[in-house]
Image (tube, rainbow, N blue to C red):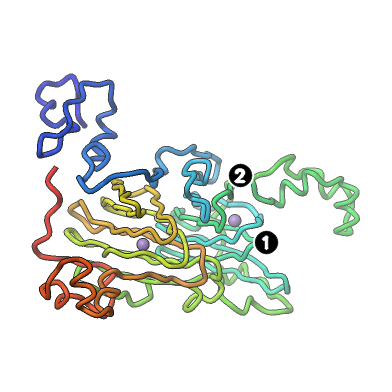
Amino acid sequence: MVDLNDKNDRHQIPQPIRSDGAGGPDYGPRDVMRDLQNPDLLVPPKTDAGLLPNLKFSFSDTHMQLNHGGWSREITVRDLPIATTLAGVNMSLTPGGVRELHWHQQAEWAYMIWGSARITAIDQNGRNFIADVGPGDLWYFPAGLPHSIQGLEGGCEFLLVFDDGHFSDLNTLSISDWFAHTPKEVLSANFGVPQNAFDHIPDKQVYIYQDQVPPSIQSQAVQSPYGAVPLSFSHRLLAQTPLETSGGSVRIVDSSNFPISRTVAAALVEIKPGGMRELHWHPNQDEWQYYLTGQGRMTVFAGNGAARTFDYRAGDVGYVPFAFGHYIQNTGTESLWFLEMFKSDRFEDISLNQWMALTPRELVQRNLHVGSELTDALHKVKSPVVKYPGFTFNPR
Ligand code: MN
Ligand code: MN
């Protein structure tokens, strides 16, 4: 912690002054803690220029929805207006805490951060799905299908991603909400039981509630006459063998290996200290990012001389508009782990390095005024995360 009133701490206070002397001191008012977290906003790389919208929002700057049984917070277009394709919800459930039976107009993709949960769902053909999920596991509920989530022993925390930036988890269709807004004689007729069976139903949406940790999954099994859903609604992402590179690792998951996930594709990326997610872009969709551990920075190139750099750390969301060039550097001392997600059935990216390697070398050399030193070093095979031994960060 930096104490502005402590003279001994003043040398730690960053100033908007570049190493070449450009800029000048800021004596305040200012939020030094935020400046320390955003060194590339305070002193941008010299190559940053032009207009780019905000591409960062932290879950720490969102409203916490606190319930008995857990909490949730979300980042949607209301918080990060550029992020129209996907919205994210960070949720935690206590042991036994339940995100109640509900459904929504958007598909739900999820990544379990820690702990474990029991998830349930059915499809339109009466086929059901009941499974326990743990760290690194995914689930996907197609739009409109009803489902629930319950924390198991120890509780859990997860990231939910919805395939519409306008989504809000506070605006879903809940079983308790529908019961509360249906006349009891209608409920009685629908289920064929007396009205007094509904004397104690909740009078409004429950959302999250505290319950006991459920018994074993075997003891809770429900057999459907139509069987289980034909495509699993969950996937063990960490069980996938990663693509290992010099700078880190990548696990790609989309409908090619998680077939039910037809509207969300993702990559779990590890960037080791000194490593970099290479210069690339995506030819199909915007990218929605969630930072899991560590610290990094991303520079996004928007054409017309525009480029801007943002600093990210665990708990932040980043965004890259469709086809904009970008790269991500680990600026910390531990591995930077993050998820990149797309509203698409397939993960697709274009590597700048690979593109140049598969183009006539004379064309590349004359276009960029470079020699064979560069064209000889190009890679025809993608290396999504790179590490160059001589790499140092820009002097500030
Ligand atoms: Mn849901
Ligand atoms: Mn990307």
For label 2, being within 8 Å of ligand 1 is answered no
- Residue at 57% x, 52% y: name it: 212
Asked which quadrant contains residue 103, the reply is bottom right
Place of residue 75 in the rendered image (x, y in percent of width and height, measured from the top left): 48, 46
Query: Can residue 291 be seen in this snapshot?
Result: no
Residue flagged by tag 1: what amino acid is it? Gly
| Residue tagged 2 | 170
Image quarter hosting the C terminus: top left
Q: Is residue 97 above or below residue 30?
A: below
* Tags 2 and 1 touching, CB below 8 Å: no
- Residue at 21% x, 56% y: name it: 334
Q: Secondary structure at mark 1?
A: loop
Pick whichever, 104 or 91, lies toward us: 104
Query: Any mark on residue 144, and which?
Result: 1
Residue flagged by tag 2: what amino acid is it? Leu
Image quarter hosting the N terminus: top left
Place of residue 339 in the rendered image (x, y in percent of width and height, measured from the top left): 38, 60
Place of residue 355 in the rendered image (x, y in percent of width and height, measured from the top left): 30, 74
